[in-house]
Image (cartoon, rainbow, N blue to C red):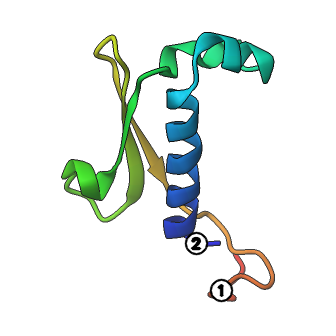
Amino acid sequence: MDEIDFEAALKGITEQIAAFDEDDLEDIGLPQAVPLIGATVLTYEEAGVLTLNRGLVVRLPNGDVFQVTIVQAARGEGSANGVTL
């Protein structure tokens, strides 16, 4: 997995949580994620963030905005690049 794949996976998970309702989140044991209901999730590229990093911009319905930067710190054995730190 690289930063691009991880970004796509994290965006997908966050978008799924944003589509849930409170009962859904309580049913799966994530009541603390309720503020994410209705959130908008964009990659840095989609949001026009001027950086070479990968990441997400998460806009909550109440107006809060979070930027989550993704940096791969090490590559495991069998990783596509094969470089291990």
The quarter in which the N terminus is drawn is bottom right
The location of residue 62, given as percent across then percent down, is 33, 11
The location of residue 30, given as percent across then percent down, is 72, 20
Quadrant of the image occupied by residue 60: top left
The residue that appears at 68% across and 11% down in the rendered structure is: 23
Q: Earlier in the sequence, mark 1 or mark 2?
A: 2
Q: In this view, does 77 lie to the left or right of 3?
A: right
Query: In this picture, is 82 found above or below 25?
Result: below
Residue annotated with mark 2: 2
Quadrant of the image occupied by residue 32: top right
Amino acid carrying label 2: it is: Asp
**Nearer to me, 51 or 58:** 58
Q: Which mark is residue 80?
A: 1
The residue that appears at 68% across and 19% down in the rendered structure is: 25
Amino acid carrying label 1: it is: Ala
Query: In this picture, is 43 found above or below 78?
Result: above
